[in-house]
C-alpha cells in the first residue's frame, strides 16, 4: 500500500478546537490503495516545517495532504498554490507575527500543488459536500506549510505529491457569528475521504 501522511493543526487565534485535526483523526486507516498516517502540527511559523519534515524523513510517505481551518470558506477547498510569503494578521501560537517576509530567500515566488486539485474538488462535490478549488491558501501558517513542503519536495523528494485542503468552521465555532457558513464534522470527514480516494 502507498503511504499518505495526513496532517491537521492545533487550535489557534483563540479558538478551542481546530476542525482540521478533528476531521483528520476520524479518517479510516485505509482509503483505496492508501494507508493513512495522521500527524498533528503546531500553528507556528518556525516549528511547523521542522515538525512535518522530521516525520517525512522517517515515514517516507508517497504523498502528503495537509489540512487546515479557513473560517468563512463555504466548503472544502483544495489549494492550488503556495506563495513565498509570510504575512501574519495575528500572531501564531508562539507569539510570532512575521510581516511581508519571504519563506525561502532564493525560492520561486510560488509553487503549485502536486495533488490533483480539480479531481479532489469534483470528488468532494460528488459526495454531496460543497467544494471548489481555491487559488490562495492565504499568507499565514497554512500557506507557509504548503509552500515549504512543495519547495522541499521539489528539491529532495520529487516523487512525493504534496497538497493542502482548507476546511470551514464547525457549527460550534459559528454560534457567535450570525450567517457564517459551517459544516458538520461527519461531512468534513466524508469530503476528505472522497478527496483522498482520487489521489
Ligand atoms: N489555519 C491557519 C493556520 C492553522 C489553521 O488551521 C491558516 O489557514 O493559515
Image: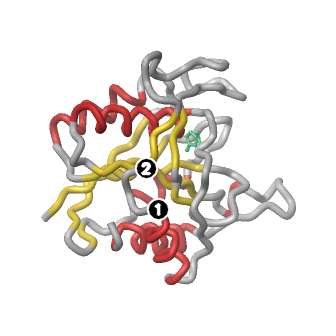
> How many numbered circles does the render carry?
2
Q: Are marks 2 and 1 in contact (CB under 8 Å)?
A: yes
The answer to which image quadrant residue 198 occupies is bottom left
> Which is nearer the eye, 137 or 5?
137
Which secondary structure, mark 1? helix
Give the position of the N terminus as an image quadrant: bottom left
At horizontal 72% and vertical 29% (from top left) the residue drawn is 89
Category of crowding for the residue at label 1, using alpha-carbon neighbours closer than 10 angstroms: few (below 14), some (14–19), many (at least 20): many
**103 displayed left or right of 89:** left
- x%, y% of residue 114? 37, 52
Task: Quickly name the residue at label 1.
Answer: 117
Which secondary structure, mark 2? loop
- x%, y% of residue 64? 32, 49
> Which is nearer the eye, 27 or 107?
107
Q: Residue furthest left?
A: 1
- x%, y% of residue 157? 21, 39
Residue 98 seen in the figure? yes
> Which is nearer the eye, 13 or 167?
167
**52 displayed left or right of 13:** left
Q: Which mark is residue 113?
A: 2
Category of crowding for the residue at label 2, using alpha-carbon neighbours closer than 10 angstroms: few (below 14), some (14–19), many (at least 20): many
Task: Report, in whole angstroms, how far the alpha carbon at label 2 lies from the one at label 1.
Answer: 8 Å
- x%, y% of residue 152? 31, 32
At horizontal 46% and vertical 50% (from top left) the residue drawn is 164
Q: Which mark is residue 163?
A: none
Write down which quadrant ligand 1 falls in. Answer: top right
At horizontal 79% and vertical 61% (from top left) the residue drawn is 180
Residue 97 seen in the figure? no
The answer to whether the beta carbon of the residue marked 2 is less than 8 Å from any atom of ligand 1 is no
**77 displayed left or right of 147:** right
At horizontal 78% and vertical 59% (from top left) the residue drawn is 175
**52 displayed left or right of 88:** left
Amino acid at each position: 500500500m502507498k503511504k499518505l501522511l495526513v496532517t491537521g493543526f492545533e487550535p489557534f487565534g483563540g479558538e478551542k478546537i481546530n476542525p482540521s485535526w478533528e476531521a483528520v483523526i476520524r479518517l479510516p486507516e485505509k482509503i483505496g490503495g492508501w494507508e493513512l498516517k495522521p500527524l498533528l502540527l503546531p500553528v507556528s511559523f518556525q516549528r511547523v516545517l521542522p515538525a512535518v519534515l522530521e516525520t517525512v524523513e522517517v515515514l517516507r510517505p508517497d504523498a502528503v495532504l495537509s489540512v487546515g481551518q479557513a473560517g468563512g470558506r463555504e466548503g472544502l477547498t483544495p489549494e492550488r498554490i503556495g506563495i513565498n510569503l509570510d504575512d501574519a494578521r495575528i500572531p501564531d501560537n508562539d507569539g510570532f507575527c512575521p510581516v511581508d517576509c519571504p519563506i525561502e530567500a532564493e525560492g520561486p515566488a510560488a509553487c503549485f500543488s502536486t495533488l490533483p486539485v480539480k479531481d479532489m474538488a469534483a470528488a468532494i462535490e460528488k459526495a454531496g459536500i460543497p467544494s471548489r478549488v481555491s487559488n490562495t491558501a492565504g499568507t499565514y501558517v497554512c500557506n507557509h506549510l504548503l509552500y515549504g513542503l512543495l519547495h522541499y519536495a521539489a528539491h529532495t523528494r520529487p516523487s512525493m505529491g504534496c497538497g493542502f485542503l482548507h476546511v470551514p468552521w464547525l457549527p460550534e465555532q459559528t454560534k457567535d457569528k450570525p450567517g457564517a457558513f459551517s459544516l458538520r464534522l461527519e461531512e468534513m470527514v466524508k469530503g476528505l475521504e472522497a478527496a483522498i480516494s482520487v489521489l
